[in-house]
Image (cartoon, helix red, strand yellow):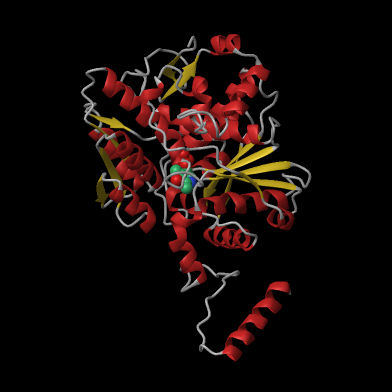
Amino acid sequence: MSCDAWFRDAITREGRWELDQIVYRSDAGNLLEVTHDLDALRAQHDADGWRALWDQRYRRAPYPLQSGVWGKKELVLPGIPDEHVVSLGEGATPLVHTGRYGEQLGLDELYLKQCGTTHTGSFKDLGMTVLVSQVNHIVKSSDSGILGVACASTGDTSAALAAYCAAAGLPSVVLLPYAKISPAQLIQPIANGALTLALDTDFDGCMRLIQQLTEDRKLYLANSMNSLRVEGQKTVGIEIIQQLDWNVPDWVLIPGGNLGNVSALYKGFEELLALGVIKRMPRVVCCQAEAANPLYRAYQNDWAFEAITAGPTQASAIRIGDPVSLPKAVAALQKHGGMVEQASEQELADECALADRCGQFTCPHTGVALAALRKLVTAGTIRKHERVVVVSTAHGLKFSNVKADYHGDGIAGIEAHHANRPVRLDATRDAVYDAVMRHIDTTLA
Ligand SMILES: *Cc1c(COP(=O)(O)O)cnc(C)c1O
């Protein structure tokens, strides 16, 4: 294959490091990004050629190319031999038309990109397959000194890392903030055999610790400051456009915490633009929980950023006060006229319940983005006829504890306006019949 990729400084866009080097920051201390030889890619296929190749592989090519990520291999990690790829069938997730729910929001065309319909239940699989494959490649083809892979996590990164490392036979270590992730997220790395460390700190504390722990390069750093993950995650944006038959949506809303994903979304769109596959960029809105909103505050304040201590939120995977990918995200949002919106705990909880009543099963982070969407529709910023995609970052089942509280004993500080309480009844025909009739009356009311 003629195309090539390497790391460069993500801010100055200078410097060159090879993808098998163990390096996470430039000499200036900036994050890195993977850059592709776009001239070589353009020479390989024109826009129609790329569209045809990607459509032909989609969900049906031989392993590993049927994966949503590896079907775009030339634009993700061109140099890796297929036998070193570690894939669990990630990506190629549904783009679901929301029907009744979109209508209730006042939109003609609202889609949910269901990134949670994948192996470990969140979009983190997309980046992790790339990172673990590359580590596997380095370990198999050189004397790298890498002993294992480690990450700090709000719960979904650790689940993905543990699964992919277990598939590859690599040791994994995960640093989690004690009692700040969901029970489902906690059991995933445990089941997959990771060393699972619950630490008395928050995510930002875990993030600082992991950078110290990986300094001597014996443990490979798997957080999204490692730009290999961005290469997998950027396929979400590409897939959205592919699933719209190569049409560009007007708006894409995405929840943001550490801000790797919004950076990745933009990188995918920018590369499609560079290959001529699309002619314009969608507007992107990064959505934050009010309790963990440092990017929103910066947006309101001429992009002047100050780290905060993030408070408790149902959207626990975005409880981050000092996002590591901030410089990348801000640069992309500024360049392309992106926006930032936020949602309160009350708003996100009710929005999840409303979407679920229309057949979805939304995680709280998706609830943040949907509540932000409702605000932008109400404000007239997003209009009825525009085509809107909301990136749903995880499967609701990973956060069923949050839903159980909402519909059950309640969540402190929140009124559950759309709670559906389970009914305990005598096991008699009349009692059940009456309950059924009451339910039908209220549902159709
Ligand atoms: C990781 C995660 C996010 C945030 O992604 P960032 O890249 O950290 O901004 C949002 N939702 C879920 C469910 C996640 O796991």
Image location (x, y in percent) of residue 236: 55, 35
> Is residue 86 left or right of 428 when viewed as pictured?
left
Image location (x, y in percent) of residue 281: 66, 29
Position of residue 419 relative to residue 47, above or below, is below
Look at 38% across and 30% down and name the residue there: 131
Question: Can you see residue 257?
Answer: no
Question: As rendered, which of 362 and 175 lies closer to the eye?
Answer: 362
Query: How many labels, in total?
Result: 0
Image location (x, y in percent) of residue 433: 63, 85
Position of residue 272 relative to residue 382, above or below, is above
Say which quarter of the image contains residue 246.
top right
Question: As rendered, which of 44 and 82 lies closer to the eye?
Answer: 82
Look at 71% across and 55% down and name the residue there: 105
Look at 58% across and 22% down and name the residue there: 271
> Is residue 141 left or right of 11 when viewed as pictured?
left
> Is residue 382 left or right of 157 when viewed as pictured?
right
Image location (x, y in percent) of residue 96: 64, 47
Image quarter in which the C terminus is found = bottom right
Question: Can you see residue 377?
Answer: yes
> Is residue 85 left or right of 193 when viewed as pictured?
right
Look at 30% across and 21% down and name the residue there: 138
